[in-house]
Amino acid sequence: MAFRCSTAVENLVLFVACLLGGLHQVAWSQTQFDSGRAAFAVGFNNEVYPYRQFASFVLPGERIVIRIIDDRDSTFEVSASAGSLERTDLKRYVWVAPQTPGSVDISIREAAGDSIRVTALIQVPATRVRNGVLNGYEIGRYPRPPIDDAMYAVPDGFIEVQESDLALPVSPHFVLGQFVSDRSPGFPKYIVLRERLLLKLEALLERVNQTYAAESFGILSGYRTPARNAAVGGSPQSRHIYGGAAAVVIDRDPVDGVMDDINGDGDVTRADAELLFRITDTLFREPEQQHLQGGLAVYGPTTWRGPYLHVDARGIRARWETDQDLQRLANPAQPRHPRNLRRR
């Protein structure tokens, strides 16, 4: 059975899903997939982005260092549609965000070549939340961090999402609306989204396309407010409430909110999610992908939804070892990578 949205929101979400697509159940040549990678990379807000299009989430007045990462003898032009921008070195700039929440376009253009566009979304500060409510929208209360770790820090800002923002690109193959789990009518809504999760999903999508045709993943659940997380019975410290987790399916044939038959056995079962698990687990064991480590779990079908894969970007390897069915899939005895998520 598929997840269903409501009224105009449903139509727009389904339109975006159709536009992005899912997975063809056929072999696919890697050359047909455009990863969206640029000829250079940009360091922005403590992450490194190799993509021509990406979004970052900052607070009003926040000072952001922009680093152009390129070992060629190239010259670049950098501009910002708002805020103040200062060049401090040949390939280093400082941008100060405006004080008003909204969207700012930052262009990093190679004089005779490629370009990268950063969409900086200025968040609404969390200090504006009153009694668990932000501008009339219920957020709920964040739990006290169980340990002194930035991974569990209460978000310091929220992205304001209007209906017109749902189709806003946040990376080459994902849009903002895919991470809005609240499908109820009415806007604005407020979400948290970690850049690290977007980087992880893009890396996984590129790997999947070595075998299958996938232009995006279906995101059944992205950000959940603490209030919504409690209502659906989520763990109090679920990565969903920190904007760092997604319930992922391959959904194209047709777009209905249910995992496709990606293993080609004629049925949609847990085995389809296990196939995606194997691809994901293999990818993030690789040394160059260690900083994107996180939680990974298979959830089998129920009477009201199909199977899916939980993916998060917590910075350390985590598996749900209580699920005995996963014992045959991967060896859980892997060292934790020392790199943790930053606060933002």
Image (cartoon, helix red, strand yellow):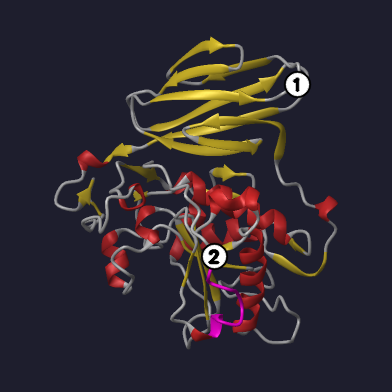
Could you tell me how far apart the alpha carbons at marks 2 and 1 are, in whole angstroms? 37 Å
Quarter occupied by residue 129: top left
Q: Which residues are magenta?
A: 325-334
Q: Residues within 10 Å of mark 2 (few under 14, many from 20)?
A: few
- From the image, tell me which residue sits under label 2: 334
| Residue for point 51% across, 61% down | 335
The answer to whether any part of residue 19 appears in the image is: no
Residue 282, relative to residue 202: is it above or below? below
Point out residue 309 in the picture as x, y percentages from the top left corner.
54, 70
Amino acid type at circle 1 is Arg
Query: Is residue 332 covered in magenta?
Result: yes
Quadrant holding the C terminus? top left
Viewed as shown, does residue 287 lie left or right of 186?
right
In front of the other: 310 or 304? 310
Q: Residue furthest left?
A: 131
Point out residue 5 in the picture as x, y percentages from the top left corner.
46, 67
Helix, strand or loop status at disc 2: loop
The answer to whether any part of residue 232 appears in the image is: yes
Helix, strand or loop status at disc 1: loop
State which tag comes first along the sequence, 2 or 1: 1
Residue 72 numbered mark, or none: 1
Amino acid type at circle 2 is Gln
Quarter occupied by residue 62: top left
Point out residue 63 in the picture as x, y percentages from the top left corner.
39, 23
| Residue for point 25% across, 42% down | 126
Point out residue 42 in the picture as x, y percentages from the top left corner.
60, 30
